[in-house]
Amino acid sequence: MRVFTLRARLRARSMIPNNSGKIINIASIAGFGGSRPDGGGLLGRLQYEQGALITLTQALATEWGKHNINVNAICPGYFPTKLSAGLAERADEIAEVTPLGRAGGDYDIKGPVVFFASEASRHVSGQPLAIDGGGSAVILN
């Protein structure tokens, strides 16, 4: 978390004098909750780190709002990437319990990032946005 905090503070250093800025953190829906009681799902460190990043996003939004700096987080669900390669064998199972019934793709991330980076989100700060095909609306952890 020190790295995320330091990077955010370095970015804000140039935004504060301009009284304007947008910071978009990339977290994960893993940060929205704890582990399943049966030990299944995502476990441990990933959830703690992502939860901490979501909380950091909210704390920085609170701290830097007076400087007109918006701080938000994109929280993807399952997207087939190098980082999620370990979940590839469970991709069908994940899609089956996701309301939209599919994994995310590049295009699914672009719109929310453009929104958070644009003036359309000028009154949105401290928000973690799940991009997960509705997965966080059901119990996926």
Image: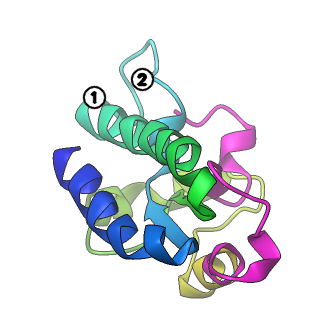
Q: Is residue 137 magenta?
A: yes
Indicate whether residue 123 is drawn in magenta.
yes
- Residue at image coords 71%, 62%: 101
Q: Quadrant of residue 12?
A: bottom left
Residue placed at 61% from the left, 52% from the top?
66
Bin the neighbour count of mark 1 within 10 Å (Cα to Cα): few under 14, some 14-19, many 20 and up. few
Which contiguous range is marked in magenta? 113-141
Question: Do labels 1 and 2 touch, CB within 8 Å?
Answer: yes
| Residue at image coords 54%, 85% | 106
Q: Position of residue 15 (x, y in %)?
A: 45, 73
Mark 2, secondary structure of its residue = loop
Amino acid type, callout 2? Ser
Query: Is 78 situated left or right of 40 in this image?
Result: right
- In this picture, is 42 found above or below 65? above
Q: Mark 1 points at which residue?
A: 44
Q: Nearer the viewer, residue 37 or 73?
A: 73
Residue 58 location, quadrant = top right
In this view of the protein, which residue sits in the foreground, 11 or 130? 11
The percent coordinates of residue 112 (x first, y second) are 67, 74
* Image position of 46 with respect to 20: above or below: above
Q: Which of marks 1 and 2 is nearer the N terminus?
A: 2
Q: Which residue is drawn at 58% across and 37% down?
A: 140
- Residue at the disc numbered 2: 35
The residue furthest left is 3
**Residue 112 visible in image:** yes
Task: Indicate the position of residue 64 as horizontal and vertical percent values.
Answer: 52, 52
Q: What element carries label 1?
A: loop
Crowd band around label 2 with a 10 angstrom C-alpha radius: few (<14), some (14–19), many (20+): some
Q: Distance between the residues labelled 1 and 2?
A: 7 Å
Residue 79 in sight in this render: no
